[in-house]
Amino acid sequence: MPSRSSSAPLISATELHDLLGSVTVLDVRYRMGGPGGLPEFVNGHVPGAVYVDLDRDLAAPPGDGGRHPLPSTEDFQTAMRRVGVSDDRPVVVYDDWSGLAAGRAWWLLRFHGHRDVRVLDGGWPAWLEAGGVAQAVAIGPQPGDFTARPGAMPVVEADDVLGVPVLVDARAPERYRGETEPVDPVAGHIPGAVNVPTSTNLRADGRFRSADELRALYAAAGVTGALRDGSSLASSGTGTAVYCGSGVTAAHDVLALEIAGIRAALYPGSWSGWITDPRRPVERPTSARP
C-alpha cells in the first residue's frame, strides 16, 4: 500500500476491509471513568486487531501532568512493539467512543514519528454497519520494530499556554463555562480559550465532517490562517493549541483540524494538569464562582 501521511488521517470501513492483512489494526475501545474495552474486544473485533489499553499503554500514571499524562517514550515504544507496530507498516486505530480514544492513539503514534496512521471513520459501529466480520478469537501479534522518535507533532506546555494565539478548549460547553465539573476539582477554563467541543467534529452518523465543514466550524471560533501548506503562523505549529480535561479527547480536535488542513499543537496536561498549580489563572462566569 502506498505510504500515506497525516494529510489523510481517516480511513473508511470499506477501505480497511480491502487492506486487512497489510495493515496493523489497533482496537482502542474505552470509556472515560468506566471499565476498559477488553471485554468488548474479546466479544468481537476487526479481524487481526490487537487490543490497546488507553490507561496502561497510552498514558502515564496521573500526577502533576494531569489525569492522563503522556507516556514516556520508552514505555510507549515498548507498548507499541508489543502490539505489533512497525515503522514500515501502516496502522489503523479504532474505538466505539466517537473516535476519542482512537484519536489519542493516532496522535501519540504521529507524535512519536510514525508516518502512516489512520483512524477508522465511524469506528466499530461503522465497521459493523459496512458488514465487517466481528472476530472473537484474538491472535497474538508478532512483535513490531517501531522506534519512537518524539516531536513530530507540536505540543505546548503549561508555561506557554497563555501565549498561544488561539487556544481551543475541546470539552463540553457547560464544562468550558464552568457551570458544572463532573471530573476535576476545579471548574472553569484557561483564560482566553475558545470552545469547540469534540462532539461538533462529527456528523449525526458518527463520522467526521468534511474538511470544508471543519474549516468553517473552527474559523467561527477564530482558528484560521494555519494551513499546513502555507502557514502564516510559527513553524512550530503553536499558532493554535488544543486542550480538554486530561489531554485525551483534545486529540480529537487536533485530528479534526488535521483533516481540515490545519496543524495544531496539543497541551497534554490539559485542564487537569493546569489546575494542579493554584497560581495559574482560571476563568469562569461570575455566577459559577464560589
Image (spheres, rainbow, N blue to C red):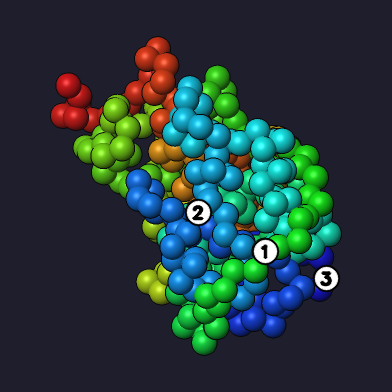
Q: Nearer the viewer, mark 3 or mark 1?
A: 1
Residue drawn at x 65%, y 69% is: 139
Q: Report the front residue among 35 and 22.
A: 35
Q: Report the front residue among 170 and 165.
A: 170
- Mark 2 is surrounded, within 10 Å at the Cα level, by few (under 14), some (14 to 19) or many (20 or more) other residues, namely many
Question: In the image as oriented, which residue stretches furthest toward the top?
Answer: 279
Left or right: residue 59 versus residue 201 is right
Residue contact at pointers 3 and 1, CB within 8 angstroms: no
Residue drawn at x 52%, y 85% is: 130
Q: Amino acid at mark 2?
A: Ala
- Mark 3 is surrounded, within 10 Å at the Cα level, by few (under 14), some (14 to 19) or many (20 or more) other residues, namely few
Q: Provide the secondary structure element on which disc 2 rests.
A: helix
> What residue did someone put label 2 on?
101
Q: Quadrant of residue 125?
A: bottom left
Q: Position of residue 197 (x, y in %)?
A: 39, 50
Q: Position of residue 73 (x, y in %)?
A: 70, 35
> What residue did someone put label 1 on?
140
Q: Quadrant of residue 149?
A: top right
> What residue did someone put label 3 on?
2
Q: Amino acid at mark 3?
A: Pro
